[in-house]
Amino acid sequence: MAFQHVIWLYLWVVPHVLLAAIAVLMFRKGLQKDFPIFFSYLFFEVLQFCLLFAVHSQQKTLMYVRVDMFAVAGSVALRFGILRELFESPLARSVPLRQAMARIMNWGTVVVAALASVFIGALYSSILNHRVFAGYVVIEALNTAQCGLLALLFLWHRFLGLRMSPFAFGIAAGMGLVAGFEPFLRALNDSLAVRYLRVPDLLQMAIYHVAVVVWLYFALAREKIRTDSKATLPDLREWAADLGRIIQP
Amino acid sequence: MIPLAILASVVAVFLLFLVFQVWRHYFRPVEADAPRLIPVDLEAFENLIDPEEELFLKANLSPSEFCQVQRTRIHAAKVYVAALSENARLLVAVGQSARYHSDPEIAAAAEEIVHRAIRVKVWCLLALLRLEAGMLFPARLAPPSGIAHRYLLVTSMAASLPGRSAA
């Protein structure tokens, strides 16, 4: 039992220490300018951890639940902001294009959130009572919508032929892990007997830990920049010849 | 139990998708040859989407004949737009590869190409959607005009890149 408690404590504390390390790394590399919402998210997560840890150590259950609710709501909202940031990141230097992308992203969010609500609503409508249902659907739907938006993010980059920067890719991959498992773990939490309730909790913390390690890895990774490689200039010349053929077929 | 099984399947599919993205990003072999742009006869394309041409056909053909001809024109326009869309995607790659060039002029031009090619790409997507709708209502929805001009602007910019880089 003591060992399980140590594991639980490790999974709760260490990821948040690593988040602080990522924030420092981002600041040193100047990445906070490119990803300000993700940078704020790191601070928010560390702050809510400190609050929750303090409340937990004083064993104030009601207070803990309130702070936890605030933390979950804040995390979900910030994650939508991060997704928007990732959609816009390749176009950061073009304001009109970024605004156009933001409009597309807004519409995409509405459509994906509606689809996710219908999907989750259809799944749970027969087994939950109406009082619990509304709150449950909102949380599950928002998490599912984030998975959908992440899938859209990858497909959108592929459609445009854009290559994500390593850090943007890392943020997306880590968020995919967190958002992907969340709906399943919540459902698992509801279907297990009370004495096994720590299992989904531990799983969730372990997955978050992996996501944080992914973020840390990509924050440390250096971007491979092609500048004056021998292949680039001849390639460009060849493309120019092709372009000439298009303009004057 | 049913929601749990369905959610587990959805999570599994999503995770497979994520793994595929990681594979694509890091382990997919890079094409050795430079991508070739699909040749597009822009003059023919502009004729195809010319509103005056459409008015002429409308005035000289019976409604059923016009719908038939219009569907054929829309189908041809779709082929052109798909080719332009693919070329715009390749131009994004051209721009991205020269984005961090040591010559700031080339880097700036490459950045501009990326932005303009993305615009063309989005425009192609919207144009394809409109053309699909046009297939259903050929008498109401005309093929979109103006795309050829935008495309020409981007390609001529990309063509100017190598000259600068060679200098």
Image (spheres, coloured by chain):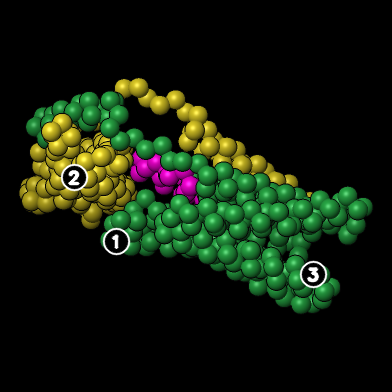
Asked if labels 3 and 2 touch by Cβ distance under 8 angstroms, the answer is no
Looking at the rendered structure, the kind of residue marked 2 is: Glu
**Residue depth check, mark 3 versus mark 1: number of the one nearer the observer:** 3
The circle drawn on residue A95 is 1
Asked if labels 1 and 3 touch by Cβ distance under 8 angstroms, the answer is no
Please state the chain letter of the residue tagged with numbered disc 3 in the rendered image.
A
Residue A94 visible (yes or no) = yes
**Residue depth check, mark 2 versus mark 1: number of the one nearer the observer:** 2
Per the rendered image, the range of residues in magenta is A147-168
Secondary structure found at label 3: helix
The circle drawn on residue A56 is 3
Q: Among the chains, which one is green? A: A
Quarter of the image where one finds residue A56: bottom right
Asked if labels 1 and 2 touch by Cβ distance under 8 angstroms, the answer is no
Determine whether, in the image, residue A181 is placed left or right of residue A224.
right
The answer to whether A74 is drawn above or below residue A93 in the figure is below
Secondary structure found at label 1: helix
Looking at the rendered structure, the kind of residue marked 3 is: His
